[in-house]
Image (cartoon, rainbow, N blue to C red):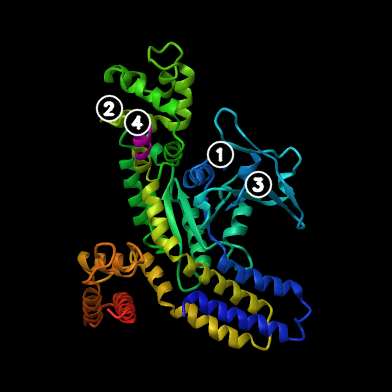
Amino acid sequence: MSTSDQVRAILGGTIAAYRNDPAYRQRPDLHDELQRIGGRLNQPMRIALAGTLKAGKSTLVNALVGDTIAPTDATEATRIVTWFRHGPTPKVTANHRGGRRSNVPIARDPREGGLTFDFAQLDPDDVLDLDVEWPAAELVDATIIDTPGTSSLSRDVSARTLRLLVPDDGVPRVDAVVFLLRTLNAADTALLKQIGELVGGSSGALGVIGVASRADEIGAGRIDAMMSARDVAQRFTAEMERTGICQAVVPVSGLLALTARTLRQREFAALEKLAGVDPTDLAKAMLSVDRFVREDSALPVDAVTRAALLDRFGMFGIRISIAVLRAGVSDSVALAGELLERSGLVALRDVIDQQFAQRSDLLKAHTALLSLRQFVQRNPVYATPQILADIDPLLADTHAFEELRLLSQLRSRETTLNDDEMASLRRLIGGSGTDVASRLGLSSGVDADGPRAAFAAAQRWRRRSEHPLNDPFTARACRAAVRSAEAIVAEYARQGR
């Protein structure tokens, strides 16, 4: 029985207990809440983007979705928690205090195509959050939540994000968090710890990854900016190793990623003209933003177009685009692919896939268990001890939860494993993907060596777990690797291989 099936069984028993209890039989609000907890298991995974003010959250939402659906300027919409869900047609709904809902008019900028929300008839202070439905394939399996900056000058604006990520009632609202960092200060670390404790429960973090955001600005727009950003991301990772609650830190230029996914032919044509300029002359013209957009420049692209390119690409994006074009790229599709790869978004999506998407059922089940536990503790019935007795072992012992926690803690805890052992262990417990081939380091698809490799892995880690010089954490990690390998062996046995 899968973890999700076990959660559904516990939930079914809980619903029956409340229906049979005279004190709660006539409480439709409680029964509705139980149904909502169960309904979450069948909904897309909820991923929240969080971070300080101007960290680039809305731009990253747009880049992930591949469309400019999140306003990025200082509009009222950026002060409100916004849920981006899949829907057949574009639609925006405001959820007001008191339960009232209203439609929000939306429009496209005729020049840039960005989405704008019309708040003329709304009081933003009366709006709890926004629901945006959009027909994007990226939203079919994941609901993305854009949050206001946690360091906003408005205490109420920051509180909106905190109520979502670390609510007072301890009931998780999201399944996973992508935390955007421009610096790493004590406030960021403290908030990450709070988020990790709520999303992961008392046993440790699940589903939290970091992004060194606006990475192109770290290197002041130089062509080697992403290299500088990778160094910064590694430093962030090292500094957060003491907390053990962030499973990865990835450098990303959200602006470049969004531009790559929405590249226009006229922009490609303008960049081609700039790439044809003598390198020395172009370098002089691009010494600063002011020089690049000067009206009297001799560049073969007019000042208005240059300003538009700067707004869409940034200096780093323009420089890297010209370098790629000079290297031989000759069409807009190829250029977009190169920019997307260099933006860091491909690496981020790989991490999201490995840490979140491939474990979405598990993360949703974990959220449901934590929510159900809070519910029965707040509203005790005769069966509460039995319900908790079912929930707590599942939260503590489910091996897939243990794998996720170890993937995070292996970054922060000392072990007696050498580099080769560490790489092998991380791969076996799902650090490179949850499919069998990724865990065993085999070529994709059916591999005749799979059963033999799984059995060998189980033997290797069983011996390593019994090493007399193991510290407790190393022994725990090795035992987890044994369980992962044995699960693969058992799966092969079920398949008759």
Gap between marks 4 and 3, in whole Å?
35 Å
Residue beneath disc 1:
72
In the image, residue 297 sits, relative to residue 214, either above or below, namely: above
Between 134 and 346, the one lying in front of the other is: 134
Mark 1 touching mark 3, by CB under 8 A? Answer: no
Which one is earlier in the sequence, the residue at label 1 or at label 3?
A: 1
Residue beneath disc 4:
331
Residue beneath disc 3:
91
- Dot 3: what SS? strand
Left or right relative to 104: residue 454 = left
Gap between marks 3 and 2, in whole Å?
42 Å
Q: Three-letter amino acid code at disc 2? A: Arg
**Circle 1 crowding by C-alpha within 10 Å: few under 14, some 14–19, many from 20:** many
User: Of helix, strand and loop, which mostly describes the magenta segment?
Assistant: helix
**Circle 3 crowding by C-alpha within 10 Å: few under 14, some 14–19, many from 20:** some
Q: Is residue 382 on the magenta stretch?
A: no
Which one is earlier in the sequence, the residue at label 2 or at label 1?
A: 1
**Circle 2 crowding by C-alpha within 10 Å: few under 14, some 14–19, many from 20:** few
Between 3 and 146, the one lying in front of the other is: 3
Gap between marks 1 and 4, in whole Å?
29 Å
Circle on res. 326? 2
Q: Three-letter amino acid code at disc 4? A: Asp
Mark 2 touching mark 1, by CB under 8 A? Answer: no
Q: Quadrant of residue 169?
A: bottom right
Boundaries of the magenta span: 331-337
